[in-house]
Structures are given as C-alpha cells and as structure tokens.
Image (cartoon, rainbow, N blue to C red):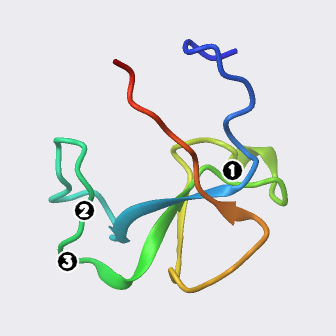
C-alpha cells in the first residue's frame, strides 16, 4: 500500500483535473487551487495513465488533455474526501 493505506491508485483510468491545459507550469498557482486562467480553455488536464497504456504512463506525473465533452472508457475521476 501507499503511505495512506491505499492500493492500486494509478493506472485504472486517466483522472480528470479541473485545470485548463498549459504547455508548462510557468505561472501555475502554488496554493493547490485549480489553474483556470490562460492556457487552452477548451481542454482540461488528465493525469495518471490508464489500463490501456504501457505502465510507464501509470504515474501522477504523467499528464495529457482532452475536451470536457469527450467520453472514453479509460477516463474517469477519483472520489475524494477531506480528513477531519
């Protein structure tokens, strides 16, 4: 498991991220908020690879982009909760 006791959190499906896609991280927010200025506002970031790719892509540092209107069986989202 990872440090939080979770197993297999990478490589299931690409995970949607709220951020607009940018070519690099210059000017990115440093407070953890979504990056919703500049960049390509027609597409959103995807992270983490999916089951239909080589294992190299199954990591949080791997990112891609797609239109928010697209539908694929290899894209999804992660359910999260805040710890008290």
- In the rendered view, tell whether residue 13 sits above or below residue 5: below
Q: Which residue is mark 1?
A: 57
Element class at badge 3: loop
Q: Which residue is mark 2?
A: 35
Name the residue rendered at 55%, 15% in the picture.
Answer: 4
Name the residue rendered at 69%, 50% in the picture.
Answer: 57
- Looking at the image, residue 7 sits to the left or right of residue 38; the answer is right
Say which label, 1 or 2, has the lower sequence index: 2
Determine the CA span between mark 1 and mark 3: 26 Å
Closer to the camera, 23 or 50?
Answer: 50
Image quadrant occupied by the C terminus: top left
- Looking at the image, residue 47 sits to the left or right of residue 42; the answer is right
Name the residue rendered at 56%, 44% in the picture.
Answer: 79
- Residue 40: x and y in percent read 33, 82
- The answer to whether the residues at label 3 and label 2 have Cβ atoms under 8 Å apart is yes
- Residue 17: x and y in percent read 45, 59
Determine the CA span between mark 1 and mark 2: 23 Å
Image quadrant occupied by the N terminus: top right
Q: Which residue is mark 3?
A: 38
- Looking at the image, residue 80 sits to the left or right of residue 19; the answer is right
Element class at badge 1: helix
């Amino acid at each position: 498991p990872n440090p939080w006791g979770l197993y297999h959190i990478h490589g299931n499906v690409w995970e949607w991220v709220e951020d607009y896609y940018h070519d690099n991280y210059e000017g990115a927010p440093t407070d953890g908020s979504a990056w919703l200025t500049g960049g390509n506002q027609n597409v959103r970031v995807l992270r983490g690879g999916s089951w239909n790719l080589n294992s190299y892509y199954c990591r949080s540092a791997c990112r891609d982009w797609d239109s928010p209107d697209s539908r694929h069986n290899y894209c999804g989202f992660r359910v999260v909760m805040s710890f008290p």
